[in-house]
Amino acid sequence: MSDKKCAVITGVTGQDGSYLAELLLQKGYHVVGLSRRSTHHQPQNIAHLTGKIDIEYSDLIDPHSIERVIAKYRPEEVYNLAAQSVPADSWSQPVVTGEITALGPVRIMEAIRLLSPETRFYQATTREIYGGVDAEVIDESTELRANNPYGAAKLYAHLMVDTYRQSYDQYACSGILFNHESPRRSLHFVTRKVTMAVACIKCGVNDPPMNEAGQPLVHDGKVQMGDLDMIRDWGFAKEYVIAMWAMLQQDKPRDYVIATNTAYSIRDLCETAFSHAGLDWKDHVVTDDRFLRPTEIAASRGDYSRARSELNWSPVATFDDLIHMMVDADISRVQDRRPNPVAL
Ligand code: NAP
């Protein structure tokens, strides 16, 4: 038996899972990543970790696949990063969003409670649990007002984390993370949509990837967007996983807001990304009502004071740093036809 600490990461193929796996390997953990079985399985984000982490196949819909892993490893820590993670898709798939995003974490907490009660549990909660709340700045005490199926599913899981903590004295915490991005962000999300569009336009790509409507991301040098006035608090994913780890090292489990306390619009995002490539966003961005959400979350910033004082965590990368990094990575990808620049 190894004396290394063992951590299980669900959603290891995703943006955060891959960064967290790297962080925990650096810290000397035995890392077990959970991945769904898929016919077209090409986990680009973790290709560079092959042989360094163990992979187990598991689906959050299937409780037995979770119990098998918890019983096999009895890990010190479990990080639940798996989810149907795309708010925009949650309107067209509300039931599967509930199955995976709301009930998945409960299946894990039950497995821990019954099979390995000393295991510490991290749940990937989101700013979307506050939904349309009327507050310029949000912290852990802000009223919970989820207003889309994804936010509602995450809110149920968030409340269940607190319920398991109170009912069973389980070490479980929620990281209430505001939007965080990186070159590993999937194309389902607006930041990558914009930075990939910039790269395709800049490099004259004539076979761009598809957008969320199943059409070419760039057509006639233009990208179609939804509401340009939408506001978000955006940070860098590689920094946010440090806060996840720090939460599970505290004496007592607690929930923490992780954010940058800044606010930028989609228009700011377009301007920053296109100008970094020497382009004028107004020549290339058009709006289309098909990309509007039925409801929007409020334009709130995240107050991460609790994380700063108790976890010694603060964000470092600025909005410009982040978007420039993503544009540069997408231009490299497009030029080299590489799926993912793993060093970022
Ligand atoms: P992501 O890149 O979309 O990764 C989601 C992961 O979940 C993928 O590895 C995916 O596996 C896995 N997954 C989906 N359905 C599953 C199922 N039924 N069973 C097992 N695994 C499943 O998301 P992320 O950006 O890394 O975010 C990580 C977590 O933080 C998510 O829970 C997300 O909702 C939450 N969060 C993210 C943000 C953000 O801004 N990034 C903010 C707040 C909270 P496949 O590769 O098989 O699809």
Image: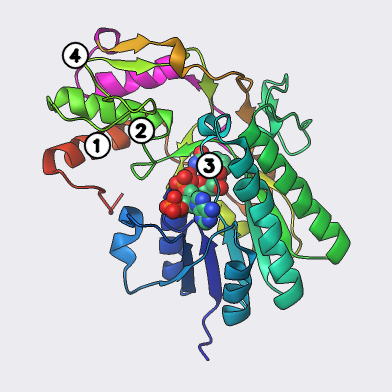
- Disc 2 vs disc 3: which is toward the camera? 3
Residue where numbered disc 3 is placed = 85
Sequence-earlier tag: 3 or 4: 3
Estimate the spatial distance between the alpha carbons at disc 3 and disc 4, rounded to whole Å: 31 Å
Bin the neighbour count of mark 4 within 10 Å (Cα to Cα): few under 14, some 14-19, many 20 and up. Answer: few
Sequence-earlier tag: 2 or 3: 3
Q: Quadrant of residue 47?
A: bottom left
Which residue appears at 32% of the width and 74% of the height?
51
Q: Is residue 233 left or right of residue 196?
A: right
Residue 330 numbered tag: 1
Task: Determine whether the residue tagged by mark 4 lies in a helix, strand or loop.
Answer: loop
Do callouts 2 and 4 mark residues in contact (Cβ within 8 Å)?
A: no
Sequence-earlier tag: 1 or 4: 4
Q: Is residue 282 magenta?
A: yes
Identity of the amino acid at label 3?
Ser
- Disc 2 vs disc 4: which is toward the camera? 4
Q: Which residues are magenta?
A: 259-283
Residue 307 seen = no
Estimate the spatial distance between the alpha carbons at disc 2 and disc 4, rounded to whole Å: 19 Å
Sequence-earlier tag: 2 or 4: 2
Do callouts 2 and 3 mark residues in contact (Cβ within 8 Å)?
A: no
Is 248 situated above or below 135? Answer: below
Residue where numbered disc 4 is placed = 220
121 and 110: which one is in front?
Answer: 110
Identity of the amino acid at label 4?
Asp
Tell me: is circle 4 under 8 Å from ligand 1.
no
